[in-house]
Amino acid sequence: MDTVSRDCLTLQTRRHFFKRSGLGLGAAALATLLRRDGLAAGLAPPAFRSIAPRAKRAIYLFMSGAPSQHDLFDYKPAMRDWFDKELPDSIRMGQRLTTMTSGQKRFPIAPSKYAFEKVPNLAEGAWISELLPHTRKMAKDLCIIKSMHTEAINHDPAITYICTGNQLPGRPSLGAWLSYGLGSTNENLPAFVVLNATWSAKRDAQAIFNRLWGAGPLPSKHQGVLLRSTGDPVLFLNDPSGVDPATRRRMLDSLNTVNAGAYERFGDPEIQTRIAQYEMAFRMQSSVPELTDLGAEPASTFDLYGPDSKKPGTFAYCALLARRLAERGVRFTQIFHRGWDQHGDIARDLPLQCRDVDQASYALVQDLKQRGMLDDTLVIWGGEFGRTAYCQGKLTRDNYGRDHHPRCFTVWMAGGGVKPGIVYGDTDEFGYNITENPVHIHELNATVLQLLGLDHHRLSVKHQGLDVRLTGVEPVKPVEDLLA
Amino acid sequence: MRNPLMAAVFLAVSVRVGGAEEIVFNRDIRPLLSENCFHCHGPDSGTRKAGLRLDLEAEAHAGAIVAGDPARSELWIRITASDDDDLMPPPESGKALDPGERDLLRRWIESGAEYQSHWAFVTPERPAGPGGPEAIDHFVRRRLADEGLAPARPAGRRQLARRVSLDLNGLPPTPEEVEAFLADRSPQAYEKVVDRLLASPRFGEHMARHWLDAARYGDTHGLHLDNYREMWPYRDWVIRAFNRNMPYDVFLTEQLAGDLLEAPATDQLVATGFNRAHVTTNEGGSIKEEVFVRNVVDRVSTFGTVMLGLTTNCASCHDHKFDPVTQREFYQLFAYFNSLDGDAMDGNRKAHAPVVRVIDDEGKMRLAALRDELAAARRTLEETIAGYQYREPDDSTEAGNKADPARNEDDKHSKPAEYRSFRRWLADERGREKSKLPGPLRASIKKDPGALTGEETRALQRHYIVHVDLEAAERFRPLREAVSRSERELKKTENSFPTTLVWKELPKPRPAYVLERGQYDQRGEQVPRALPEFLPPMPDGAPNDRLGLARWLLMPVHPLTARVAVNRFWQQLFGVGLVKTAEDFGSQGEWPSHPQLLDWLAVEFRESGWDVKALLKTIVLSETYRQRSEGAPEQYRRDPENRLLARGPRFRLDAESLRDQALAVAGLLVEQTGGPPVKPPQPDGLWSAVGYSGSNTVRFKPDRGPGKVHRRSLYTFWKRTAPPPQMIDAPSRESCVVRRERTNTPLHALMFMNDPQYVEAARAFAERFLGAPDDGIPERLFLHALARPPGPDERGVLRESFRRHLAHYREHPEAARALVAIGDRPSDASDPERLAAWTMVASLMLNLDEFLTKN
């Protein structure tokens, strides 16, 4: 598409249209057109925005299926001596297991087969597995939380829980809250964009759900917009074949004229809003292709993100798009990378998964840093829960599987006001229970909101008699220790 | 959220300015206390602070209020405290009272601080006033007069025809229907239109889709694999119920407890799918009890929301913070819904038991005929067998048998041995390690030959003759094959009828327990089935089960059922309910904009015998409904949601109506009621982008052909984890929703312009009129799309638009051909360039605000 000519068309015709229709824009439409940072000029910010933001936007690299913290971040050398020995009852303490392994006769310890190295950060260093060589290089940027925990033990409820604050479907997602709370800074792109990446593990991948980026009871304009790598990047973005931008423009001009007439008859400001939304749709038809056109990226970008970044749909490609979205002011980008559910055959699948994301995650953080954007862009990496210390299925020194484990898992964050170069929280010698500084998923979400300048407690909406919020009913606090 | 908030402010302000100086506790005070105080000083004993309750008059007066004396009332002192430590509500709660609200509380205390029972918990009584549609106008106008406003003039017949057609059938009127209405000068002209619409089968479809949001109907299980669930007979039951004007009390009773009726018909069982329509899972690793509890909680919450307009689910974890439902009472309700005779996990099967197979009358006849055929085939076989004389060969051990003993090994791949001797076969068969004989024979064969009874011997011999003996079996083969053909045909036909999920009650109910904090494994005391205490008791003689629950809901003194129902119907027509929070009539819900009107409608509805069509007819015949929707911008700004009803309803149509309307004006819509869900095209990859690789709904394969592609939208396959993209602002059907919102985004604009279904509709719309001269086409487009002719300006815009598009397509014929080729139905235009130009104009019509909106 010819972006320049389309932009020209936009400008000319908008001016022309508003002049010709003799239509003073009503306050409502004006507010829609001019809304920046979610607020029309002159309105006081709502109470939930009383916190000074440290980040303006966030990128969530969501590892769906639950990566094994044992094989990536939570180094437990003592477990080697426990190979194939029974997990002590004193550790398990009768905690519930999924029914995939609760019937197992034994719970034999499966020490990680991967080599760990302690790499320097800004504190005592961080142990990171050989599967993540690029991540190792950026330990100084990362705030690694080893003490994440949740209550859900199966994928569907757990991922719904961490993404929306409730295990049952129907609540607004993190991105929807950010869009609602902060609004958009780019009127030509949605405030919340979702990317679904391809993955390399061979096993069936767990499902994800539209509800993970849904708006629940918030207005649906806050739901995540899928940016697709096949077909129209945004649903129905492209004009049908046989309709070029000039034809579309002609159609819109006539449409606007008739709609303006309807406004004069009905007096309903919703008509003005509709005119404005059609104009924004037209602008998106150029802003989105411009966004996804990587032609102007220098070779060094692709070197940084790796060869996959040229292949639409890969995690590396999505990570690069996430940077481009951040540059354009999109509040929240969430990449879902599936395939992390290693109940068996870790030796085959986990390295494939790590290769998908390791270099690109590193590249994204470095790229943001180089552009001076890491300071106000929060990057989050992690899944919905952790994996067990004991083996599911057949155990050998070289291969094993791990079941779901909600009691501890690892998430890292970078940039955006988060304390860099630290490892936070700790677990026991089996990586089973948290021994220090637990961080509940609600607390992680509260912290994310806080970093973006939102009071997680006040950010609520009334729904079915409840004050619905991302962080649940019970009081929680952001984790101050994680803030820079 | 901004707009609704503004609306609330406008309303509140206008109420107070509008003269009602008198403070009404339920309207003015309860919402303030509920929002700001009840969290810590309300019904929930678990979070109550300082032992103070403000939800009960006696306790409030004993604690924090001195009637008539704000200065001595702790409540007043604390809400006006200057010290943050003393201030109520505490600043950290995020709640705050503004000066106007504080003033209201002061005046209320001064005037005696009287409480009223929560309005919605008191049985509605018919307020004095006229009857029929005039009652509606009476109450609406009284309110308007209070506000110093006057009703709008009546809408023109064209506007009214389109409005009422979209409201009652979800489809626009045809130009012929509009003309007939215009031509009918009788005083009943409008009423006749209404009657026609109420009698149309399209009525049931339109009503059903609203109910299906509430019933959270979907075509997949909704969790994890999200596999196909066969449930559409329930959807069709709902359509039929509305079309037959099933009284609402029967409608509720059959859905809640159809299985408990005496000798329930299949249809009444199908109705019980209401309590099975919630999402289910079969995720590996799930803990059954946890899934079980979630399923039951969903049923109770849905029952609460749909039937009672109460947010009972709040009480699943703790006593309700705002309404008098205790946690114990929640689990007492839970006890009515926990005894399903079936597995909590869905097994990823489309027929998650208990199910019934639904066979229509024609099907029953076909099956009966097939059964007769089968019986006849079997009879012939038996008769032939009976007439056959088997003779054991003289030398049964050797000459009588050609069998190669090596092939007698129990090897699946070898051909069965060929026998001429029963005795020889018997001996071989006995020697086999694994017999493949039918069950009953398998036991006999293992016995010592001497121990066989005569009957057993006969059975074995019969088997031998019919299936084994080289000569005899061959003779019986055609008969045998006739029987199996007939069996297969019967089975196939039986399986061709759909099943649907239904309720079946366990013979002995499961015990129910209070679950601490809602946790499935934190059982507290066991609780019986019982009703919340603040609502009326079970009617005398009613069984204490779901059937009793239904009777209870429908008893005349019940304060909620009728109000909640009429409010939803009102919301459907006017965009917003008289109680805006259609899902919550509790103290956190909104005070009704017209309390007396709501009560009048509720009593009228109940006393009419719960006649849904009559209720809708009364409403649409009112002058309130028939007002014109044109207003000054000032009017829209003052009351954007039209809560005061000073004009006719005007709001964007719901997703289903939008698509159906486009198909209808294009002449594409296939009006066929019921049947399996269909898959009109959608962009590639929407399902696979989210689906579990092993799910049977991970790949979307679009249907072809108008019978599937151009059906009404309520028949579109509803995958709950990735609903159809055309269903803008629709709930995902993962949980009960009784109120949709309406947003206005650029993504909608892109869809209406570019979705191939809409492009096809635009082209088909244009094709209808290609036989007419170009000058006459704008008129036709307008009449079909908007039920009115274009104004001179509009006609000019369309003509000019066509002229310019045509000039473009004459220069780019390949573009014209590409455009008109889009869609399921092929185009046979002789002049594709002219068609392409009109397609663009038709597309403009389908994108007009006036088209997307009910005016």
Image: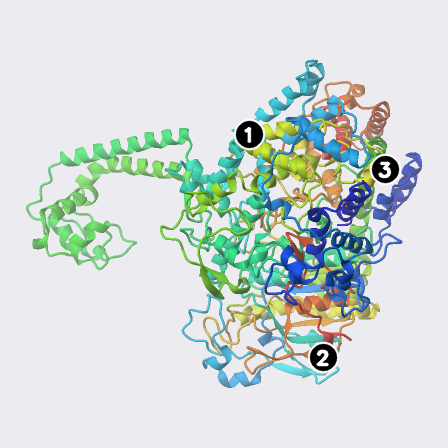
**In front here: B84 or A95?**
B84
Which numbered marker is on residue B162? none
**In front here: B769 or B540?**
B540
Residue at image mark 2:
A422
Q: Alpha-carbon neighbours of circle 3 within 10 Å: few (<14), some, or many (≥20)?
A: few
Confirm whether circles 3 and 2 share one chain.
Answer: no
Name the chain under label 1.
B
What secondary structure is marked by label 1? loop
Name the chain under label 2.
A
Residue found 78% across the figure and 49% down from its top: B2
Q: Alpha-carbon neighbours of circle 1 within 10 Å: few (<14), some, or many (≥20)?
A: few
Gap between marks 3 and 2 measured at Cα: 58 Å
Does residue B224 appear to the left or right of A132 in the view shown?
left
Residue found 73% across the figure and 48% down from its top: B28
Gap between marks 1 and 2 measured at Cα: 71 Å
Q: Position of residue B224 (x, y in %)?
A: 54, 56
Which numbered marker is on residue B634? 3
- Residue lying at the far left of the rendered structure: B394
Q: Quadrant of residue A477?
A: bottom right
What secondary structure is marked by label 3? helix
Name the chain under label 3.
B
Residue at image mark 1:
B608
What secondary structure is marked by label 2? strand
Q: Is residue B360 visible?
A: yes
What amino acid is at disc 1?
Ser
What amino acid is at disc 3?
Glu
Q: Position of residue B292 (x, y in %)?
A: 47, 57
Gap between marks 1 and 3 measured at Cα: 40 Å
What amino acid is at disc 2?
Ile
